[in-house]
Image (cartoon, helix red, strand yellow):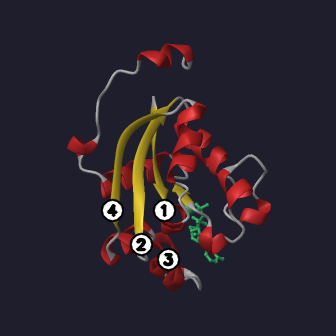
């Protein structure tokens, strides 16, 4: 079973879209294994977005992510990484398909509501960056037998 890291960015929290965004992932059939509501420190934001350092939007991105609380999560499921990226939609909301979170709820790349790991490597490193191993909860979800064959 695959796991991926998801974060509702400060605009999602400020706009009251936590339940809307988490609800879409929950209803899709993904299993929550970790979640916390937190203010992101500058060092954490810089490490999380290290790959974008030096790009024109980097400073604004760090300001954005540290501007208010976020909801950090890990979700699990078959092909969870691809499923979540698909449900989140394209980076630029005007290119995101209707039915996706960004395609339905956002208009600008700099306020695109949610982060999701883009591959197995980032899913692993981002999960380890945002959560300690004991924050990942092992639990049984009987309804999963109706979702995962
Ligand atoms: P992703 O979030 O879809 O994986 P990335 O290309 O990894 O997209 O970019 C990370 C984040 O940086 C985006 O979600 C967005 O918040 C921000 N970002 C990317 N490109 C731009 C831009 O051109 N202007 C402003 N912000 C940007
Ligand atoms: Mg990315």
Label at residue 64: 3
Q: Tag 1 or tag 3, which sits nearer the N-term?
A: 1
Query: Is 25 in front, or is 44?
Result: 25
Task: Find the distance from the CA under tag 4 to the CA under tag 3.
Answer: 14 Å
Q: Tag 3 or tag 4, which sits nearer the N-term?
A: 4
* Residue shown at the point (59%, 86%) measured from the top left: 56
Residue 83: percent from left, percent from top = 61, 39
Label at residue 13: 1
Return the residue at label 2: 68
Residue 59: percent from left, percent from top = 49, 85
Q: Secondary structure at mark 3?
A: helix
Q: Secondary structure at mark 1?
A: helix
Q: Circles 4 and 3: CB distance less than 8 Å?
A: no
Q: Circles 1 and 2: CB distance less than 8 Å?
A: yes
Q: Circles 3 and 2: CB distance less than 8 Å?
A: no
Mark 4: give few (<14), some (14-19) or many (20+) Cα within 10 Å.
few
* Residue shown at the point (57%, 82%) measured from the top left: 55
Q: Nearer the viewer, mark 3 or mark 2?
A: 2
Q: Tag 4 or tag 2, which sits nearer the N-term?
A: 4
Task: Find the distance from the CA under tag 1 to the CA under tag 2.
Answer: 8 Å
- Whether disc 2's CB lies below 8 Å from ligand 1 is answered no
Q: Nearer the viewer, mark 1 or mark 4?
A: 1
Task: Find the distance from the CA under tag 3 to the CA under tag 2.
Answer: 8 Å
Q: Secondary structure at mark 4?
A: strand
Q: Circles 1 and 4: CB distance less than 8 Å?
A: no
Task: Find the distance from the CA under tag 1 to the CA under tag 4.
Answer: 11 Å
* Residue shown at the point (50%, 13%) measured from the top left: 145
* Residue shown at the point (33%, 56%) measured from the top left: 130
Task: Find the distance from the CA under tag 2 to the CA under tag 4.
Answer: 9 Å
Return the residue at label 4: 38
């Amino acid at each position: 079973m695959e796991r991926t890291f998801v974060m509702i960015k400060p605009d999602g929290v400020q706009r009251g879209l936590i339940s809307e965004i988490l609800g879409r992932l929950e209803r899709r059939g993904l299993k929550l294994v970790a979640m916390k509501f937190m203010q992101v420190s500058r060092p954490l934001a810089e490490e999380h977005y290290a790959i974008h350092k030096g790009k024109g939007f980097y400073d604004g991105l760090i300001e954005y992510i540290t501007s208010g609380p976020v909801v950090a999560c890990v979700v699990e499921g078959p092909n969870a990484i691809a499923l979540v990226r698909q449900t989140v939609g394209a980076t630029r909301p005007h290119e995101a398909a209707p039915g996706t979170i960004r395609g339905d709820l956002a208009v600008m790349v700099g306020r695109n509501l949610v982060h999701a790991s883009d591959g197995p490597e980032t899913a692993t490193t981002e999960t380890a960056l945002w959560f300690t191993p004991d924050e990942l909860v092992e639990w049984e979800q009987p309804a999963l037998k109706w979702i995962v064959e």
